[in-house]
Image (spheres, grey):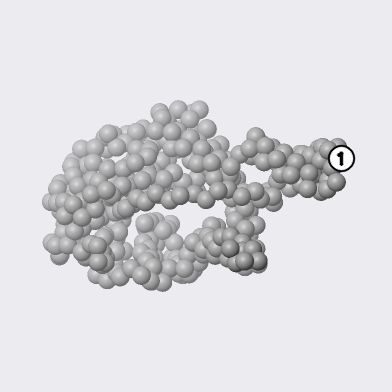
Amino acid sequence: METKSNKDWMVMVHNKCEFKHGLFVSSNGMSGGLALMWKEDVKVEVQTFPPSHIDALVDGGTEYVWWRVTDFYGNPETTKRPEAWAKLKQLSTTSTPPWLVIGDFNEITGMSEKEGGSARPRQQMSNFVNTINYCGLRDIGFVGPKYTWWYVRRDGEQIRERLDKALATTKWLNLFPEAKLHHLTSSASDHSLLLLKLVQRSRRRPKKLFRFESIWLKDPRCEEVVMEAWNDGLADQIDFPLVSCSERCRLKLEAWNKIEFGHVGNKISELQKHLEWLEMQSATPYNVQDMKATQVELNCWNEKQDAMWLQRLRINSYQAGDWNTGFFHAKASARKLKNHIEGLLDENDC
């Protein structure tokens, strides 16, 4: 990936994400920069790591053989692009394991991968295509929006291109026939995130529990909902009004949350899909304006989701500005397992 960051910053990110191992190539100002991080149970042998790429071998474990991955960054200067293709050709001759090349190539294979702006020189695109063919690589395709990079000029015209790709040899595609590359939209970058899924597994979702969300307190209508529910519970005139009041509060808050807030995860997913849809539309001024507004709203809902995780974690080490890393999700999962009650025993231990 293009980190646009120096080594010290990436080491901090590496530590926060709790990866055991990592290798970082510092950026040149605000361009370039590479990072490769992996967990303790993954065996990786790094081969070379100049500024343009990180080349490594990955142990597939008992299920797969060793395979090769190259995180590649194409030079943004067109005059230096031939040097990048020469390096990629050289890498193709160094070893024979199943090979995956993924990253920001800063080039397209044809005008079908570009929208807006001036036409790309045909020879420039042909050089990239010839390099791909020389290395025996194939585009593994993608799921999601077509373009992975966008730019809005001062005159309002939007330029979109598919600069980020995953290319693989036939051996690698035979090793991972179900591999899917997903283009994930980002509200904080002009590039899409690339998510490569080698194996897809379905997970059963547990029954949702009721939780009083701290984000509700930021809405003044929450107090009105609680007061109305409490008065209804007192009006029931039963021996234990607290039970009735609490139950009515739960029901009214759930109904109010569904109407006013909705499920935060569903809302983020909805905005994400809308952003993906906008990226696949024509670059009109209205669509560009709608895209920016959707990115702002998506960031707001991401902050709300952070607040929900903070409430579930109950740890003081979570500070403003931290994001939902694997560490915080692991803490929440550990609390859930600890608080789970599988059943109760009577006096006969039954």
> In the image shown, does 137 or 203 lie closer to the viewer?
203
Foreground pick, 11 / 238: 238
Q: Position of residue 201 (x, y in %)?
A: 37, 51
Quarter of the rendering occupied by the C terminus: bottom right
Q: Is residue 225 above or below residue 198?
A: above
Which percent across, then down, holds residue 40?
Answer: 38, 71
- The residue that appears at 29% across and 69% down in the rendered structure is 44
Q: Which residue is mark 1?
A: 237
Location of residue 62 by image quarter: bottom left
The amino acid at mark 1 is Gln
- Whether residue 133 is visible here, answered yes or no, is yes
> Is residue 252 left or right of 160 when viewed as pictured?
right
Outermost residue toward the front?
348
Left or right: 182, with 70 as reference point: right
Q: Is residue 278 left or right of residue 87?
A: right
Give the quadrant of the N terminus.
bottom left
Image coordinates of residue 90 in percent, x first then y, are: 16, 61
Task: Answer yes or no: is residue 223 visible.
Answer: no
Residue at x-position 24% and y-position 62%? 63
Query: Which residue is painted at 27% across and 43% down in the image?
Result: 141
Dot 1: what SS?
A: loop
**Total label count?**
1
Q: How would you rate the neighbour count of disc 1 (Cα within 10 Å): few for under 14, some for 14-19, many for 20 or more?
A: few
> Residue, x 53% and y 41% (percent of image)?
266
Q: Position of residue 159 (x, y in %)?
A: 39, 36
